[in-house]
Amino acid sequence: MRKFDAVLCDLDGVLRRFDHDGQRELEERYGLPVLATAFAPEQIRPAILGRVTAEQWLASITAALGGHPDAVRAVEAFAAVDFWVDEKVRDLLAAVRTRMPLILVTNAMDNLDSHLARMRLTGFADTVISSAVVGVAKPDLGIYEIAAAAAGVAPDRCVFIDDRPENVTAAQSLGMIGIHYRGIDDLAILGAQV
């Protein structure tokens, strides 16, 4: 097993979980493609690069869905979908952090700090690298380089964890150990470090 000196971890889909059933139910209730619209590159990219606020992103989704009252209600329901921390992942990452730097690397919006506070994750990691702050989003190699520098570790001494294969592949191209996260068992390499 290769040695590593820092853990770089995605937030959404790894540490933070969303109510995906609730998202699908709201689409069925309103008969609108809220998710496809919200995460279409032309909608999401400006928000995760910090060019527009989360509120402006939501307004752009409403407009793209036609701007009618059902679109407004559907987007309000989408914005209110619940999220929570995966406690097993949190506990494992907290244990790893006692031995090496933990950096959260996330494609996020300007409301990230309030979301971290709501989940009681403020100060959980040594540093949080938010795409909206640094102006570079995964899988752009720049965000991984920023994260490794924040950890004070060469890229080839980092583990990178993400639920999206393309983000893992990008990290591996810099020599990082990449983990495609699908469940807690994928993090066995971290357990060996605690």
Image (tube, rainbow, N blue to C red):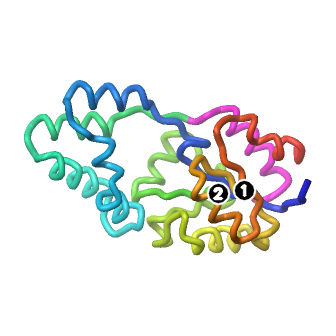
For mark 1, give the secondary structure. strand
Measuring from the top left, give residue 44's x and y in whole percent.
Answer: 35, 57
The main secondary structure of the magenta stretch is helix
In-front residue for pair 87/40? 40
Instruction: Give above or below for 30 relative to 113.
Output: above
Question: Residue 15: percent from the left, percent from the top?
Answer: 61, 42
Label 2: which residue? 168
Q: Name the residue tied to disc 1.
A: 178
Residue type at mark 2? Val
> Could you tell me the amino acid type at mark 1?
Gly
Q: Is residue 46 above or below residue 115?
A: below
- 28 left or right, relative to 135: left
Residue at image position (40%, 59%) is 110
**Which residue sits furthest left?**
68
Is residue 30 rendered to the left or right of residue 69?
Answer: right
Give me the residue at 30% from left, 61% from top.
42
**Image point (70%, 57%), residue name:** 160
Q: Does residue 81 sit above or below 110 in this rendering?
A: above
Q: Can you tell which mark lies on residue 16?
A: none
Magenta-colored span: 85-102
Pointer 1: residues within 10 angstroms few (<14), some, or many (20+)? many
The image shows residue 58 at horizontal and vertical percentages of 26, 50
Q: Report if residue 92 lies within the magenta region.
A: yes
Name the quarter where the C terminus is drawn. top right
Query: CA gap, disc 1 to disc 2?
Result: 5 Å
- Are the two marked residues, 1 and 2, in contact with CB atoms closer than 8 angstroms? yes
